[in-house]
Amino acid sequence: MIFGMIILTVLGIISFRDIKEKEIPMWLIWCCGALSLGRVIYLLATGAFSPLEILISLLPGALLLFTAYITRGGVGYGDGLLALGIGPAVGPAVLAAGLGIAVMASGLFSGVLLILKKAGRKTRIPFVPFVAFGVGVMLFA
C-alpha cells in the first residue's frame, strides 16, 4: 500500500505537468520505474515474489505502447511508458482496473467537451490525470 501511495503522489505531480505542458517528463517515469523495482525487491525479501504477477503487471503498459504505435501517436508513448513504470508498484489488478476507469472517465470528459463544442475530434487531452484518478479509486476501493 505504501508503494501505491507514493506512486499516487508521483502521478499527481505528473498530472499537473501533463495538463500544463501536454508532455510527461522522462525522469518522472524513471522514478515510477524505480519505485516498481523497489516493490519487486521488497516482494523478493518477504518471499511473496511472483514472477507471473510482475509480468502480468507489465501487460497494460505494453498494450498502451502498442496502441500508441498503431495510432501513430494518437495515444502518447509517455502514457504507455508510465503504465509500464507503475505496473509492478501497484499490481496488475489495480493497474488494469485503474486504466479501465481512466479510459471511461476520459471518454466521458471528451464527450462533454464535444457536446459543449469546447473541443474537436482531434483535440488532445492529457490522459495522466485520468490514470491518477483511476489508480486512486482502485487503491482506496
Image (cartoon, helix red, strand yellow):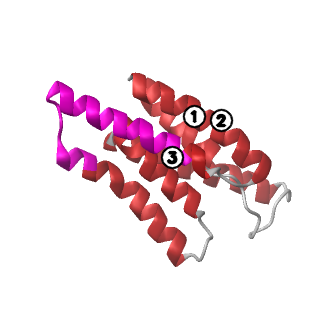
Nearer the viewer's eye, disc 3 or disc 1?
3
Residue extent of the magenta highlight: 29-54
Query: Magenta stretch mostly in which secondary structure?
Result: helix
Q: Distance between the residues labelled 3 and 1?
A: 11 Å
Pick the quarter of the image with the C terminus. Answer: top left
Crowd class of label 1 (few under 14; some 14 to 19; many from 20; radius 10 Å): some
Q: Can residue 131 be seen in this view?
A: yes
Kindly identify the amino acid type of the residue bearing the numbered disc 1. Answer: Val
Q: Is mark 2 on a helix, strand or loop?
A: helix
Residue at numbered disc 3 = 30
Left or right relative to 69: residue 90: left
Q: Mark on residue 119?
A: none
Nearer the viewer's eye, disc 3 or disc 2?
3
Which x, y percent locates residue 136? 51, 31
Compare residues 11 and 32 and report the one nearer the observer.
32
Residue at numbered disc 1 = 10
Kindly identify the amino acid type of the residue bearing the numbered disc 2. Answer: Ile
